[in-house]
Image (tube, rainbow, N blue to C red):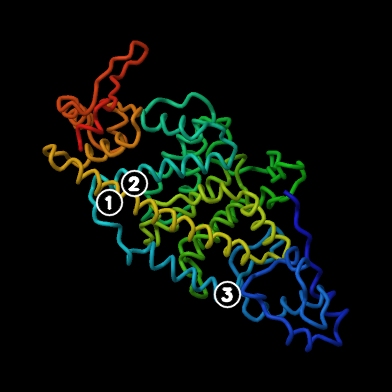
């Protein structure tokens, strides 16, 4: 992508427009029309009467300087990052707090153990796929989903990346109550990159002996970010973990802001040969779960980021080119989180309706457990779907024998048909051709 123009230097503008500083300050506001604009965006808009674009920018920067707060994160030259909270950000934080920290419960049909586990697996799969695709995995969603649901081993690097990401999300769930340590960060990197990197690059920071990794534009090949030198990485990792755990805090950091800054910190440092983006997003998930945002077990932010990769990259670049102002990155991530929450809400609504419909349709067909109801609901919508004991087991997190009993029972009732493909080891179950008629 195109690197945004670095804004004019404020000290130079102060000198150049010293005679108009008071007028400029009074004419500008930190968020014109409610937006936190970078100079790259500002230069395409009309400035207030009596000001040119540089004077307008000076006024905005002066107005922002009053509210900016310093972060423990510093760049490779020791200059701290900073941020401010705008009214729109306060509103976003309130919305996310209300929806993701437990005040708004999942619908009761989805919160029962079966549907809840199915929703969880679906979300972990979606995050595993899209987070890996952001880093170059090329496997289709259908193939990746088949791999995870069937339990087969990955057949190439792309599938290995997705499989690793799926297992890492489970690992993070298991360690969400732990303090973040350098060892835990390295272990996350091991889980994410096992089998996709040379063994000597897995689970370790780059060293001065390595060719230091940098970030290039996919379109032009031009370097758009040069991370700190390898000599700084261990100490920076220690500082990042201290920030994640709330050590040495001199003021309150909203948990969401802390999680987003953690994402930015790892992305800025780029301490590994590969997998930095995946580790950054994994740490964001750890922080959200660690601070009690339980709904994030069921949310994929990478699926939103994947649809707008240029904006994701631009939020990093806006931050770095405007004197380490992390507000751009935080605003973008808050918007991504809101959109991911909305997508989850829509999914929950659909699943609630589907479960209710399936239960209504099937209520006169005898007793069905929640797993069978979920499968039959899916089969009604996907006439050519195929199921195996393994896929049913993984989807609902039950024992193999339980999954097999579910499917055999549906075969006995005439709702599924059992096949024994010659080329496959596993028995395949398909919806009966008369399923739709049989459950009316």
Name the residue located 44 percent from the left edge and 43 percent from the top edge. 126
**x 30%, y 19%: residue:** 426
Residue 297 placement, left or right of 60: left
Q: In this view, does 134 lie above or below 158?
A: below
Q: Name the residue under label 2.
A: 119
- Marks 1 and 2 in Cβ contact (< 8 Å): yes
Query: Is 204 left or right of 396, judged from the image as shown?
Result: right
- CA gap, disc 1 to disc 2? 8 Å
Residue 168, how many percent across, how many down?
43, 42
Decide: few, some or many residues near mark 3? Use Cα within 10 Å; few <14, some 14-19, many ≥20: some
Question: What is the secondary structure assignment of the residue under circle 1?
Answer: helix
Front position in the image: 203 or 260: 260
Q: In this view, does 154 lie above or below 167?
A: above
The span from disc 3 to disc 2 (Cα, nearest Å) is 34 Å
User: What residue is drawn where x is 55% and y is 55%?
Assistant: 263
Residue wearing tag 1: 110
Q: Is residue 91 toward the left or the right of residue 424 in the image? A: right
Please rate how many residues cluster around mark 2, counting C-alpha atoms within 10 Å: few if below 14, some from 14 to 19, many from 20: many
Q: What element carries label 2?
A: helix
Q: Residue furthest right?
A: 16
Query: Which tag, 1 or 2, sits closer to the chain's start?
Result: 1
Residue labelled with disc 3: 86
Q: Residue 130 placed where, x, y %?
A: 51, 42
Among the 4 quarters of the image, the one containing residue 384: top left
């Amino acid at each position: 992508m195109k690197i945004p123009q670095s804004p004019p230097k404020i000290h130079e503008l102060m000198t150049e427009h010293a005679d108009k500083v008071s007028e400029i300050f009074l004419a500008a506001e930190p968020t014109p029309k409610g937006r936190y604009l970078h100079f790259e965006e500002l230069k395409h808009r009309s400035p207030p009467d009596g000001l040119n674009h540089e004077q307008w920018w000076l006024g905005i920067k002066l107005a922002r300087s009053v509210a900016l707060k310093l972060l423990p994160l510093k760049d490779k030259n020791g200059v701290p990052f900073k941020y401010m909270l705008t009214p729109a950000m306060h509103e976003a934080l309130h919305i996310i707090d209300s929806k993701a920290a437990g005040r708004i419960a999942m619908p009761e049909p989805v919160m029962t153990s079966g549907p809840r586990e199915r929703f969880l697996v679906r979300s972990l799969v979606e995050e595993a796929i899209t987070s890996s695709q952001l880093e170059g995995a090329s496997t289709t969603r259908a193939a990746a989903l088949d791999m995870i649901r069937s339990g087969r081993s990955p057949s190439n690097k792309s599938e290995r990346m997705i499989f690793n990401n799926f297992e890492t999300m489970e690992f993070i769930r298991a360690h969400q109550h732990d303090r973040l340590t350098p060892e835990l960060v390295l272990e996350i990197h091991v889980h994410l990159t096992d089998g996709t990197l040379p063994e000597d690059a897995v689970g370790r920071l780059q060293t001065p002996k390595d060719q230091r990794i940098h970030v290039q534009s996919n379109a032009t090949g031009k370097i758009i970010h040069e991370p700190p030198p390898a000599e700084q990485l261990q100490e920076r990792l220690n500082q990042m973990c201290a920030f994640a755990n709330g050590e040495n805090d001199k003021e309150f950091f909203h948990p969401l802001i802390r999680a987003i800054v953690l994402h930015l910190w790892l992305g800025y440092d780029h301490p590994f040969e590969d997998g930095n983006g995946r580790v950054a997003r994994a740490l964001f998930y750890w922080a959200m779960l660690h601070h009690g945002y339980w709904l994030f077990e069921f949310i994929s932010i990478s699926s939103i980021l994947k649809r707008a990769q240029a904006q994701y990259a631009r939020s990093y670049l806006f931050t770095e080119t405007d004197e380490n102002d992390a507000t751009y990155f935080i605003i973008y991530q808050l918007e991504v989180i809101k959109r991911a929450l909305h997508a989850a809400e829509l999914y929950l609504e659909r699943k609630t309706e589907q479960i209710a419909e399936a239960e209504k349709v099937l209520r006169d067909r005898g007793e069905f457990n929640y797993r069978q109801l979920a499968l039959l609901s899916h089969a009604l919508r996907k006439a050519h779907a195929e199921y195996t004991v393994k896929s049913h087991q993984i989807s609902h997190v039950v024992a193999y024998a339980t999954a097999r009993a579910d499917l055999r029972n549906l075969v006995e009732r005439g709702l599924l048909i059992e096949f024994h493909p010659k080329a496959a080891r596993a028995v395949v179950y398909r919806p009966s051709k008369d399923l739709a008629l049989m459950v009316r």
